Image: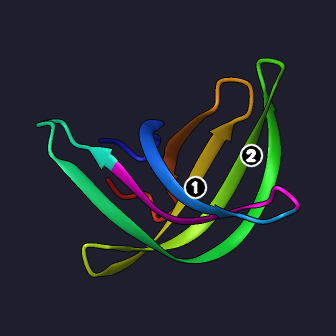
Amino acid sequence: MNADANLPIQLFCVISTLGDFTPVRFRYADEEGLVHSVSIASLIGKSTIRRCGRDILCYRCHTDWEGADVPVELRYDIVAHKWSLARRLDGGF
């Protein structure tokens, strides 16, 4: 995986009565097909970007990734209803 992976994920979140998402953890499959689960420690911030005429929700989070504090950016495509791990903010992968 590279620093701009755009990796499809399954995201588990809490949704408020107002419809706001709070990410809790996500799962992804690596190149060998093994499924990994990553807990989200805290939300750094969220924003909306526009890509190809679509609104994308961006969540910057601190995660507990195999015992290390790793900042990541998660994205939700509102039209396609799909979550992705856009990138690690520390440049790793």
**Which quarter of the picture shows residue 53?**
top right
Q: Can residue 79 be seen in this view?
A: yes
Q: Do the residues labelled 2 and 1 touch (CB within 8 Å)?
A: no
Question: What is the chief secondary structure element of the magenta stretch?
Answer: strand
Question: Quick one: SS at disc 1?
Answer: strand
Q: Which residue shows up at 70% across the image and 50% down it?
A: 58
Q: In which quarter of the image is residue 21?
A: bottom right
Q: In this view, does 45 lie above or below 91?
A: below
Q: Check the image and tell me how it is coloured.
A: rainbow
Q: How crowded is mark 1: few (under 14 residues within 10 Å), some or many (20 or more)?
A: many
Residue name at image x 25 percent, y 73 percent: 66
Residue 84 rendering spot, x and y as whole percentages: 51, 41
Q: In this view, does 24 lie above or below 20?
A: below
| Image mark count | 2
Q: Which residue is drawn at 24% across and 55% down?
A: 36
Task: Say which residue label 2 marks.
Answer: 57
SS of the residue at dot 2? strand
Question: From mark 2 to mark 1, how far is it between C-alphas?
Answer: 10 Å
Which residue matches tag 1?
73
Residue at 44 percent of width and 58 percent of height: 91
Between residue 92 and residue 33, name the one nearer to us.
Answer: 33
Q: In this view, does 79 lie to the left or right of 63?
A: right
x, y (%) of residue 40? Answer: 49, 72
Whether the magenta-drawn stretch holds residue 79 is answered as no
Residue type highlighted by circle 1:
Glu
Q: Which of marks 2 and 1 is in front?
A: 2
Q: What residue type is labelled 2?
A: Leu
- Magenta range is 18-27
Q: 19 above or below 67?
A: above
31 displayed left or right of 21: left
